[in-house]
């Protein structure tokens, strides 16, 4: 899992593991668990999640 340090400067150190994201036809980004394939979270502001790899 990515780590936040005490700086709070708006970025994560490292990538979020066991997660991926894909863009839905509506334009929203959805986060998916790599092991089970379940959808975890939907982001409604049309910007991708920080530090989560994108599916091809």
Image (cartoon, rainbow, N blue to C red):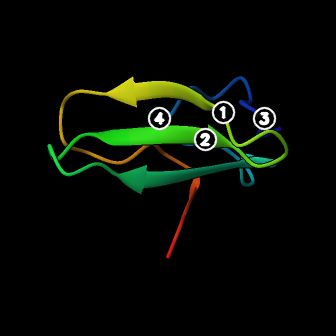
- Label 1 to label 3, Cα distance in Å? 23 Å
- Label 1 to label 4, Cα distance in Å? 27 Å
Few, some or many residues within 10 Å of mark 2 (<14, 14–19, 20+): many
Residue picked out by circle 2: 32
Q: Residue at x 71, y 30 (%)?
A: 4
Q: Residue at x 18, y 31 (%)?
A: 45
Quadrant location of the N terminus? top right
Q: Nearer the viewer, residue 26 or 46?
A: 26
Whichever of callouts 2 and 3 sits on the residue coming sooner in the sequence is 3
Whichever of callouts 3 and 4 sits on the residue coming sooner in the sequence is 3
- Label 4 to label 2, Cα distance in Å? 22 Å
Label 3 SS: loop
Residue picked out by circle 4: 10
Residue picked out by circle 3: 3
Q: Report whether 3 appears left or right of 56.
A: right
Number of the front mark, 2 or 3? 2
Looking at the image, is 3 positioned above or below residue 23?
above
Few, some or many residues within 10 Å of mark 4 (<14, 14–19, 20+): few
Few, some or many residues within 10 Å of mark 3 (<14, 14–19, 20+): few
Q: Residue at x 35, y 48 (%)?
A: 48
Few, some or many residues within 10 Å of mark 1 (<14, 14–19, 20+): few
Label 2 SS: strand
Q: Residue at x 49, y 24 (%)?
A: 41
Indicate the quadrant where residue 2 lies. Answer: top right
Image coords of residue 42 (percent x, y): 39, 27
Image coords of residue 28 (percent x, y): 24, 40
Q: Are marks 2 and 1 in contact (CB under 8 Å)?
A: yes
Residue picked out by circle 1: 38
Number of the front mark, 2 or 1? 1
Label 4 SS: loop
Whichever of callouts 2 and 1 sits on the residue coming sooner in the sequence is 2
Number of the front mark, 4 or 2? 2
């Amino acid at each position: 899992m990515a780590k936040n340090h005490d700086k709070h400067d708006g970025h994560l150190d490292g990538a979020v593991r066991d997660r991926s994201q894909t863009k839905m036809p509506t334009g929203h980004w959805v986060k998916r668990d790599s092991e089970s394939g379940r959808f975890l979270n939907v982001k409604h502001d049309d910007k991708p999640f920080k530090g989560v790899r994108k599916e091809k």
